[in-house]
C-alpha cells in the first residue's frame, strides 16, 4: 500500500540510479518494446511516476496512486532518473527536464518529469512543440525497462 503524505514536504533529492515507475497498457508494447507513445505528456503537468525511494513498483497500480481507478492488469516500467535527458534538443537546447517530487495526500511517492524553457526557474511548462515532445518520448523510451508485464 502506498505511503501517505501525512504532512511531509516534498523531497527533491534524487540520485541517478533511483528508478521511477509508471504503468502501461498491454497495447503499449510493440515487438516486445514499449512504444514512445506510452509516455504521454499532459498539458498541465509532467508525466506521472512513483519514485523508488518511497514506493514499490506495484504502487503505480494501487487506487491511491492511480486516481481510484483499477489498473491491476496493466504492466509496469521503470526509468532511471539518470536517463532523463537534461536538455533538448541536443544540438541547440531550448528546454530542460528533471524529476519533481509532487506528493499526493494518498501517494507520497508521486513524482512527475517536469519541463520548461531553459532559464525559466523551477516551474512546469509543457514542451511547446510536437517535435520536442516526440523527441523527448523517443529518447526516454530507449531507456524504459519492463518491471512487470500486463496480466
Image: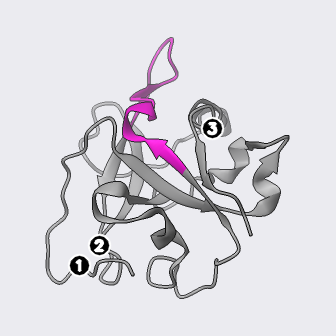
Q: Sequence-wise, which precedes: disc 1 or disc 3?
A: 1
How many residues crowd mark 2 within 10 Å: few (<14), some (14–19), many (20+)? many
Q: Which residues are magenta?
A: 78-97
Task: State which quarter of the image contains the N terminus.
Answer: bottom left
Is 41 on the left or on the right of 115, as rendered?
right
Residue 130 placement (x, y as % from top left): 67, 39
Element class at badge 3 = helix
In this rendered view, identify the residue nearer to me: 42 or 62.
62
Residue positioned 70% across, 74% down in the render: 73
Q: Residue furthest right?
A: 31
Is 94 included in the stretch rendered in magenta?
yes
Label 1 – label 3 distance at C-alpha: 30 Å
User: Cβ–Cβ below 8 Å for labels 1 and 2?
Assistant: yes
Per the image, the residue denoted by label 1 is 5
Per the image, the residue denoted by label 2 is 108
Label 2 – label 3 distance at C-alpha: 25 Å
- Residue 139 picture quarter: top right
Residue positioned 60% across, 63% down in the render: 23
Label 1 – label 2 distance at C-alpha: 5 Å
| Residue 47 in sight in this render | no
Please say which color scheme the image uses: one colour
Is 132 on the left or on the right of 4, as rendered?
right
| Residue 80 in sight in this render | yes
Is 89 included in the stretch rendered in magenta?
yes
Element class at badge 2 = loop
Task: State which quarter of the image contains the C terminus.
Answer: bottom right
Element class at badge 1 = loop
Per the image, the residue denoted by label 3 is 141
Amino acid at each position: 500500500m502506498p505511503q501517505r503524505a501525512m504532512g511531509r514536504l516534498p523531497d527533491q533529492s534524487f540520485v541517478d540510479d533511483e528508478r521511477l515507475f509508471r504503468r502501461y497498457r498491454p497495447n503499449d508494447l510493440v515487438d516486445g518494446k514499449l512504444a514512445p507513445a506510452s509516455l504521454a505528456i499532459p498539458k498541465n503537468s509532467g508525466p506521472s511516476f512513483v519514485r523508488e525511494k518511497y514506493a514499490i513498483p506495484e504502487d503505480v497500480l494501487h487506487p491511491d496512486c492511480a486516481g481510484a481507478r483499477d489498473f491491476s492488469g496493466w504492466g509496469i516500467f521503470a526509468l532511471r532518473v539518470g536517463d532523463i535527458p537534461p536538455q533538448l534538443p541536443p544540438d541547440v537546447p531550448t528546454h530542460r527536464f528533471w524529476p519533481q517530487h509532487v506528493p499526493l495526500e494518498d501517494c507520497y511517492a508521486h513524482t512527475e518529469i517536469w519541463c520548461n524553457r531553459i532559464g525559466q526557474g523551477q516551474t512546469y511548462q509543457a514542451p511547446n512543440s510536437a517535435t520536442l515532445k516526440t523527441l523527448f518520448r523517443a529518447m526516454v523510451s530507449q531507456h524504459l525497462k519492463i518491471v512487470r508485464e500486463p496480466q
